[in-house]
Image (spheres, helix red, strand yellow):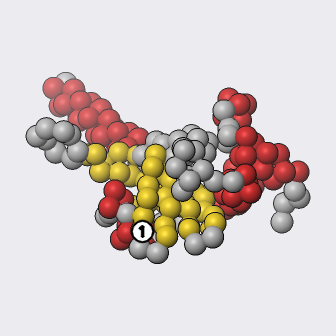
């Protein structure tokens, strides 16, 4: 009887550890808020240049969710598992970045801000992108998401009415076009 109780307790502890480890592997994308397992849903890894030039992303594993080039500036929205350290003493922890980061690379200059979807626009001209650039980023994002999720139909199946309700107008517009296009 004691052995059975001991084995039951050990089993519960092991299963809890397995489920906790699995839950810690989930990522939430920065544009739609879809939770996914990065071992199954695969976005392109961010170019090494981002980690090299952007001090806030140095040595972070990030993925590209969209990209656009405007003149001599490359814009990316990236996200990944980020190192989070407490203000005081204590160990750092690795957590999924929920808002993502908009990155602007011009030569060896890097600027980075929290992306929060497409809602990063600020008074600074670097971040005040024209509608054509936002459209380009949205089109690129939809292409990347369809690829990462294993096809257009599978990706679109993750977009609930609630997700669609809060999309940036540029993303919503490109999504409507994307949905009407025939699958390749």
Q: Quadrant of the C terminus?
A: bottom right
Q: Nearer the viewer, residue 31 or 54?
A: 54
Measuring from the top left, give residue 116's x and y in whole percent: 53, 41
How many numbered discs sit on the rendered protein? 1
Relative to residue 6, is residue 39 drawn left or right?
Answer: right
Q: Residue at x 60, y 50 (%)?
A: 128
From this view, report whether residue 51 is shown above or below residue 32: below
Q: Is residue 177 left or right of residue 17?
A: right
Q: Which residue in the protein does label 1 denote? A: 109
Residue 70 seen in this snapshot: yes
Image x and y of residue 158, in percent: 67, 42
Element under disc 1: strand
The residue located at (42%, 68%) in the rendering is 109
Q: Is residue 134 left or right of residue 122?
A: right
- Give the vertical position of 155 relative to 166 (above or below): below
Task: Tell me which residue sits at (58%, 72%) in the image.
Answer: 72
Residue 57 lies, with reference to residue 35, above or below; the image says below
Picture quarter containing residue 52? Answer: bottom left
Disc 1 residue crowd, few under 14, some 14–19, many 20+, Cα 10 Å: few
Of residue 80 and residue 74, the one placed in the foreground of this image is 74
Q: Residue furthest left?
A: 89
**Residue name at image x 60 percent, y 63 percent:** 67
Nearer the observer, 17 or 79? 79
On the question of residue 149 being in view, the answer is no
Q: Position of residue 40 (x, y in %)?
A: 54, 56
Dividing the image into 4 quarters, which one contains the N terminus?
top left
């Amino acid at each position: 009887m004691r052995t059975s109780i001991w084995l039951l307790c050990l089993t519960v502890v092991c299963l809890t550890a397995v489920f906790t480890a699995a839950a810690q592997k989930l990522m939430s994308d920065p544009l739609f808020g879809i939770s996914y397992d990065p071992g199954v849903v695969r976005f392109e890894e961010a170019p090494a240049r981002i980690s090299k030039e952007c001090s806030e992303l140095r040595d972070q594993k990030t993925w590209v969710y969209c990209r656009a080039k405007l003149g001599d500036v490359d814009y990316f929205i990236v996200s990944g598992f980020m190192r989070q350290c407490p203000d005081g003493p204590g160990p750092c922890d690795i957590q999924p970045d929920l808002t993502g980061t908009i990155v602007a690379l011009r030569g060896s200059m890097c600027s980075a801000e929290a992306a929060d979807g497409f809602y990063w626009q600020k008074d600074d001209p670097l971040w005040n992108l024209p509608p054509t650039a936002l459209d380009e980023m949205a089109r690129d994002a939809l292409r990347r998401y369809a690829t990462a999720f294993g096809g257009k139909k599978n990706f679109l199946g993750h977009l609930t009415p609630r997700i669609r309700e809060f999309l940036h107008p540029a993303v919503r517009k490109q999504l409507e076009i994307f949905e009407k296009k025939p699958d390749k």
